[in-house]
Image (tube, grey):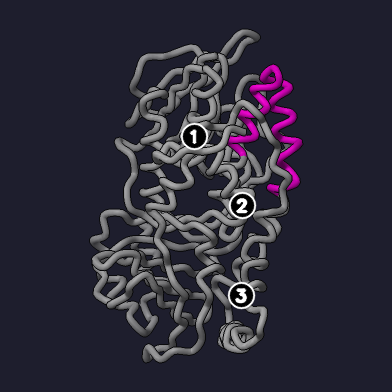
Amino acid sequence: MDILISGASVAGPSLALWLHRLGHRVTVVERAPALRGGGYAVDFRGRVHLEVLRRMGLLDAMRARATHMGDIAIVDRDGALKATMPSAIFSGDLELLRGDLGAVLYDATRDHAEYVFGDSIATITQDADGVDVTFERGAPGRFDLVVGADGVNSKVRDLVFGEVPRRDLGVHGCIFTMANEFGLDRTALMYNEPRRTVTIGGVTKDKAVVSLFFTANDEITKTHPKAVVAQAFGAAGWKVPRLLEAMRTAPDFWFDSTTQIRMDRWSRGRVVLLGDAGYAGGPGGNGTGLAVVGAHVLAGELRRLPFDKAFEVYERRLRPYVATCQKQASGGADFLVPDTDRRIAQRDRFFRVIRYLPPVKHLFKHLATRTAEAFDLPDYGGLGHTRDLSGNRGNAL
C-alpha cells in the first residue's frame, strides 16, 4: 500500500520502519523544516519498551546515545542538599535526548521512506478506495491509508475527527538547553517552591537541560510563552534569575501545557491515529514508550488483517495499556509540582528515609516500571529482525 504518515517525531518514524519491512511504500510529512535536534530527555522503561526497541534493531544504537544520568540532588534556596531522588524515577532504563532519539529513528528509515519536511496536510477526503490529501505546499496525492502521528495538537485528528476531549492536567512548563556552567556531570539538581519546580541536568560537559514547570489557577495564554514563564518564575529564588536570562535567548525553547487526549475511537475509515495524536498520556504516562509500542502493534495487525480489522484490533489491544498509563499520569502534578511547602517537605522526607531501606533498589525499579510493563506484547513473527541496525547480530523473532 501507499501509506502517508503525518509527523516525524517518534511514533511516525517507528511505524515507517515496520511498514517498510512489510513491503509498503511510506511517505512521512513533517511541518518542521528539518529534523529537530537537542531538546528534552525522553525515556524507555521496563521489558516491554526495551523488547520493542530490540525487535526494531535499534536498542544498541539508542544505548550508545544514552544520557546515563545519575541521581537528582534536591536542594534548598541556598543550594544545600535536602534529599536525593534516584535516577530511575526520571530516567527509566534508557534515557536519550529527544533529538538523539529522532536521529536514530531517522537514520534507520531515511533510505526506505520518503521524508517531506517543511510541509503539512491541508485537507483529507476519503472514499471507499483511498484517501485524497492536499498539502500546504506540495502537490496533492492519493494514498491507501493515512496515519496521524503528529502529536497532541494533531492536524490529522482535527481534520478527520473534529474537536475531541482534552484533559488539562494543570501543569505548564518549558524546557531548553544552555551552557553547563553548573559543574554537573551526568547528574541533576532540583529546586522547588510551592507550585514551581526547577530542574537542571548536566547531560554533557558543555550542555545542560533546564526545565521550569508550574501550575496556574487561571487559564494561560501561549501567545508569548517566554513571557508567561518569566512571570510565573519572576519571584523565585536559587539560580532561577540566571536560568530565566538564558531562556530568553535559548534557540531550542519548548513550551506546552500537560494534556491528555481521550477519544472513543482512534480510527475513521482509512485514517488512524498513533501516539500522542490519539492517546497522549501526559508527564509520567510513558508517552515515548507508548509511541513505539503502538507503532509495533499497529504494524503487526496490518500484517495479519485487512486495514479496517487491523485498526480495530490495534485499538482493542492497546486501549487498556493506554488507560493504565493515563491513570498514572493523572496524579503527576502532585509529584512534579507540589503545591505547598508541607507537600514539598513530605516528598523530600520520603526520599531521605527510603534510601536506608535494604530493598530500596528493587523498590524503585518496581515503581519506575510497573505501569510501563502492564502489557502483554504480541509476537508478530516476521516483523522481527535478523540484524541489529547498529551493526550487531540479533535474533530472528
Residue 247 showing in the rendered view: no
**Picture quarter with the C terminus:** top right
Secondary structure of the residue carrying tag 3 is helix
At 53% across and 32% down in the image, what residue appears? 385
Name the residue carrying label 3.
Answer: 361
The residue beneath circle 2 is 281
Question: Residue 147 appears in which quarter of the rendering?
Answer: top right
Mark 2 surroundings within 10 Å by alpha-carbon count, few (fewer than 14), some (14 through 19), many (20 or more): many
Horizontal arrangement in the rendering, residue 261 relative to residue 374 (left or right)? left
Q: Is residue 202 magenta?
A: no
Q: Residues within 10 Å of mark 3 (few under 14, many from 20)?
A: few
For image coordinates 42% across by 55% down, the residue present is 96
Residue occupying the point 64% across, 61% down: 369
The tag earlier along the polypeptide, 3 or 2, is: 2
| Left or right of residue 185, residue 146 in this image | right
Depicted 75 relative to depicted 92: above or below: below
Of badges 3 and 2, nearer the viewer stands 3
Question: Image quadrant of residue 344?
Answer: bottom right
Q: Disc 2 on helix, strand or loop?
A: loop
The magenta segment: 294-322
Q: Position of residue 208 (x, y in %)?
A: 31, 67
Horizontal side, residue 294 vs residue 57: left or right: right
User: Number of labelled discs?
Assistant: 3
Q: Secondary structure at mark 1?
A: helix
Q: What amino acid is at disc 1?
A: Gly
- Residue under label 1: 12
Q: Quadrant of the N terminus?
A: top right
Q: Position of residue 24 (x, y in %)?
A: 52, 17
Q: Is residue 50 left or right of residue 393?
A: right
- CB of mark 3 within 8 Å of CB of mark 2? no
Mark 1 or 3: in front is 3
